[in-house]
Image (cartoon, rainbow, N blue to C red):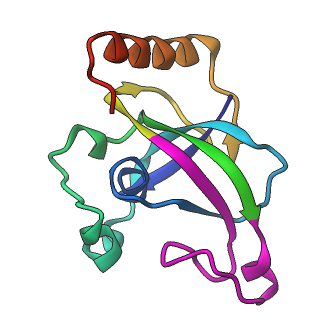
Amino acid sequence: MQAMSVQQPWAFAIARGGKSVGNQSTPTAYRGPLLIHASMRVDLKACDSPLIRSAGWDPRDPLATIGAVIAVADLDHVCSAAVRDASCDCGPWAARGSHHWHLTGVRALPRPIVAIGRTDLWQPAPGLVNEVNTMFATAAALGNVT
């Protein structure tokens, strides 16, 4: 499993609002499960974005926190067409000039898990992965699957 840190409110939009594309400066060969970590930085201008508002942005929501893992997604594929100024059909969340990391199967955590993130793709500590898996297993056993 890998992880990526994303500024708020974009991380919230992935976890709660259907943002299925991560805009990255580099491509990756990695495919598979990906922890979504809300970084310590907040893109304040984005908080007023129509896309963010349509995602249900609410700074009072626990998943609007910073410095924590808030969701798990599957990195399905990467589109690099926009980097070459070619057209792509990656949707409204896709930014020009970025590699579009397509996220599927997004599952918000029942509560955030405080963690230190890093830039680019990073390897989470085994204890963090275990905590995420335990949290989902507990929620499933209680019938609280998100």
Find the magenta span and give its range. Answer: 79-106
Q: Position of residue 92 (x, y in %)?
A: 48, 78
Callout count: 0
Q: Is residue 139 above or below residue 117?
A: above
Q: Is residue 47 left or right of residue 84?
A: left
Residue at image coords 43%, 53%: 14
**For the N terminus, which image quadrant?**
top right
Q: Position of residue 109 (x, y in %)?
A: 37, 30
Q: Position of residue 50 (x, y in %)?
A: 29, 79
Q: Is residue 138 left or right of residue 25?
A: left
Q: Is residue 133 above or below residue 13?
A: above
Is residue 84 magenta-colored? yes
**For the C terminus, which image quadrant?**
top left
Q: Is residue 145 left or right of residue 38?
A: left
Q: Is residue 137 above or below residue 93?
A: above
Residue 119 in view in this figure = no
Q: Position of residue 124 (x, y in %)?
A: 63, 25
Q: Quadrant of residue 23?
A: bottom right
Residue 146 in view in this figure = yes
Q: Is residue 77 above or below residue 138?
A: below
Is residue 140 magenta-colored? no
Residue at image coords 82%, 84%: 84
Residue at image coords 49%, 72%: 93
Residue at the limit of the structure toward the left, as seen here: 60
For the residue pair 47 and 101, the one nearer the viewer reads as: 101
